[in-house]
Amino acid sequence: MMKRLYCSGWLLMLALCVSAVIPDMKFRRLDSRDGLKNTQVNCIRRDSRGFMWIGTTYGLDRYDGYRFKVYYSHANDTLSMLRNNVSDVQEDIEGRLWIYDGVDYSVMDPVTERFDRHPERWLHEQGIPGSIERIHIDRHGHYWVKTYHDGLWVFNKRQGLSRQFTFGNEAQQLDPQFGVSDIWESGNSLLMISNNGEIVCLNTHTMRISWKSNKVQTLSNLRNVFYAIRTDAKKNIWVLTEGRSFVFVRSLGKWVSSATEALQLMGIEGFPSDMKIWDIASDKHQQLWLATDHFGLWVVSLSERQKRQFLTVRNDETTISDNTLRKIYRDQLDRMWIATYMNGVNFYSENLFHFRNIEAGNINTVCIDQQGDYWMGSNDNGIIYYNRKTGEQTVFNKSNSAINTNVIVSSLAASDGSLWFGTYGGGLIAWRNGHFTNYQMTGQKADLAHNSVWALCEDQWGYIWLGTLGGGLQRLDPKTGKFSIPLNSENSKLASNYVSSIQLTEDGRLLIGHSNFYSWVDPKTMTVRNCTFDAEIGGIPSTPYTNQILQDSRGLLWQATMTGVTIYDTKRDRIWLFDRDNGLSDSMAGGLIEDARHTIWIITMHGISNVIPQLQSDGNWTFTVRNYNSRDGLQTGPFNQRSAALASNGFVLVGGHQGLDIINPKDLGVGMVREHPKVSGVKIVDAPVRNIEGPLQIDYADNLFTLQLATDNGEAHNRTRFAYRLLGFNNQWLYADVSQPTVTYTGLPSGNYTFELCILQEDGTLDEQPYRLSIEVLPPWYRSWWMLGFYFLLLAAFVGWLYRRSQDKLRLERMKMEQENRHQMAEMQQHFYETVSDELRQPFQNAFDSLNGIMQRETDEQRYEQQQLLFNQMEQLLEQVNKLFEDDAAKKKMQPQIQELEIVSLDEQLVKDATCYVEDNLDNADISVETMAEALAMSRVHLYKKLTSLTDLTPSEFIRQIRLQHAEQLLRKSQLTVAEVAYRVGFNNPRYFSKYFKEMYGMMPSEYKNTVG
């Protein structure tokens, strides 16, 4: 058995050595699940801004590394592209895109995102007449334009120079029947092939025709078909048409009529004889990539004479997505893009995957011995030893070794070099000096307490601590082989006998995870302190069953559960929960490990998350999360609980159903392209707008906008993390979502802002050069400059009106004062007349009577005359007094009686009418703002605003207050019960009546009734 395993390992190493030149490549896929609108792809191109342009049979897709934006042809929109079938995309020196649909060209302005359906007009302005047949923009920015009637033109835009190659049979002329099928640039050479197979080679430096050839035309004997022309790294020329290949083998100086034959001449054999090639390309290692029909992708090393085939593998998304491939494109960053026939785009980059897998079955646990080799505990095949140097695997199981079970669930590499394995139902296994020793439960006090050993740990004195599945915690002295009396819930404070993990912390204590949160155990005194996570801290739900618990080098506690990971800062009494909703690749967390960089790796069912904690200046923690799954090169899973280990070289090892994954944290981010952040698009009120190339101006009415974040990398499924802030609104750095990074703002006050965007580095630091975007939120129409001028005029008019009103008011006040004065004088007169008339009239009458008596007795005529004169004067005075009183009486009799008016304002009338309406419908529980507004002939909004401004009560509060006031009277004056009163005043629920009555009067209705009664 051992000999067969050794031979298998040797053969594996031999195979690895043979294919070492061409690695086992892993790919990322882009398809309809990612937003690609059509998965039949014709061409791929990366522009100078980092966008990937994917031409499909129906539409043009733009990809920024996170999301797609599609452009279609619209018959009624002359600013859209001419047709939807996109065959080729090229970028000119001004950043415009030339879109070829197989017949005509459309030119797109990437800033305005508008298409010019007649680019020949621009060429006419540059001195190139005629209609465009084909155009090629070379790496120098020169335009090579083949027209239908005027031959071939080359135009140097920078220098404004052009040259024409006319039709004719001379060396520097083109055949008049030369219809361009394809153009390919190789170094300083530009190869053009016609649809009849004729080849013309031009020099892009001298702008002259170098040579012509009709050899392919002779070999193929095909007319009016599509020919594709390519060159490889060895300058061999490949012509592909109708499933056939014609290759000029430069080392032999001859053409051959099949790709298989050409490859054989180059020293590479073993290709299918019926292999059809649709496209070829060379990578940066000068390896030849062949896109075939139904034979997948072939990568050929011409120098090493090796080949490797890549086919789609079901349920493995790191393989190519289709076996029929149409185009291969190498971008400016030496990454390879593959267009498939039906399944979208595949992407390959050497720096894309940093994970390696050892196929060893279903691995539950792993530990590393003193030589750095791996000992894996499997779920069904015992213990597997892996030699890192040779790649050899040795299996120790129940059938060939002295172990009791094949189900290994925990492992430990002790400081003395011994290895320990916990099993499910098979006890404890020790590997020492090349031999296995089994420990099983016997029922004796000094023996193993339970046969299911779920966790293992070594303390500072070399004792082995065991966590069992039902027997609690136990200590083993490896020197004597004696077990201590177990700590369990019956003989100690240990909260649970189901122990899942054990960790020796820096202070020498044991951190125990179990089915009831966790416990601290002092290994010296055996004292136990049970702990839980307080759900009231931050309002975070807690899960008692702990899959694993870890205290990191910062002192943070990490609890992995089936609902996520709980993080607890014991110093600051803060708690966080991470699950799928806020960053983890999966909510079912089964394992934790801290690497040499002090970042935390969280093992979930179908992915692994790397978390970088950072302590901020304000004492709060931030956590940067990066997720990895099968698309990144990990196994598809599921991963097993507590299956992670840290090797001495810093590698993180994780076991799962497809073997052992090996992660080198130092490689993550190494060799990655230097990328720059940008805003790739904007949505205003969920409607996309143009690209962002300058300041963004937002109308106040559209003050709900989303910024789409990206970089100029263009990588498929980009994992770059972003930090952002909006200066002028919030200066604090915030973090965008990883998978779809966007930032949405709504209701920003009008003004000027600066949006800053930074790339979050692998170590959690920010890029020093942020991207900046100026944003102006325009004021609402009522705050625009012309409205401000109108407000000024309105204010001036209002001030004038106030002045006139104040003057009118003063004048009215003066009139009122004068009227009041006249009224007071009249009252004084009346009072005087009423008071003085009788008192004044009687003395006059007495004086008349006395004077009349004297005059009757007077004998002296002179004195009589004098008396008569005095009498006449007194009589006139009395007549005047009587007349005065008579006139006043008559005047009083004729004076109209004006009734004093009661002046009531409209506001007072509104409150009065509203009160009457409520009182008239007091027992109706269904009255509302709407019914009141209808009864008062007002709109609901107007009633709400008016009543609120007059009473400081909303209409609902106004209705409720009147009900409660009547209820108070009924409680005080009637014998009705509380419930009867509630229904009498319109409350359907006496409980709500009691609640609101207490809020208004400070006591319950029943208390109030007893108090006043």
Image (tube, rainbow, N blue to C red):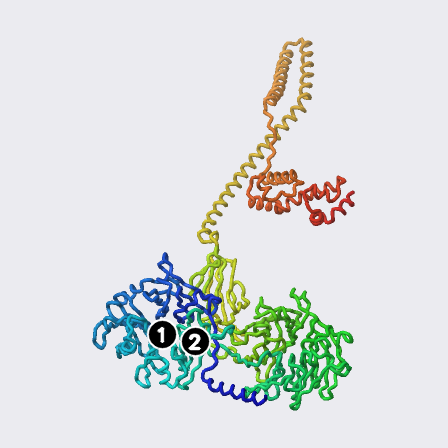
- The answer to whether residue 892 is above or below residue 465 is above
Between residue 531 and residue 911, name the one nearer to us.
531
Q: Quadrant of residue 495?
A: bottom right
- Cα distance in 3D space between marks 2 and 1: 15 Å
Of the pair 63 and 378, the residue shown nearer to us: 378
Q: Tag 1: Cα neighbours inside 10 Å, few (<14), some, or many (≥20)?
A: few
Residue behind mark 2: 296
Position above or below: 673 against 414: above
Name the mark on residue 243. Answer: 1
Percent x, y of residue 770: 48, 71
The amino acid marked with disc number 2 is: Gly
> Does residue 700 appear left or right of residue 876 in this picture?
left
Measured from the top left, where is residue 990 in percent x and y?
A: 71, 47
Of residues 827 and 76, the one nearer the viewer is: 76
Q: Is residue 327 left or right of residue 957?
A: left
Residue at image point 58% right, 32% down: 819
Mark 1: secondary structure: loop
Residue 845 visible in image:
yes
The structure residue drawn at horizontal position 65% and vertical position 24%, both measured from the top left corner, is 833
Q: Is residue 547 above or below residue 1004?
A: below
| Image-quadrant location for residue 934 | top right
Which callout, 2 or 1, points at the residue further toward the start of the chain?
1
Image quadrant occupied by the C terminus: top right
Residue 749 is tagged as: none
Which residue ends up furthest to the bottom in the rendered image? 433
| Tag 1: amino acid | Gly
Q: Residues within 10 Å of mark 2 (few under 14, many from 20)?
A: many
Residue 662, position in %: x, y? Answer: 55, 80
Which type of secondary structure does the marked residue at label 2 adopt?
Answer: loop
The x, y position of residue 461, in whole percent, is 71, 86
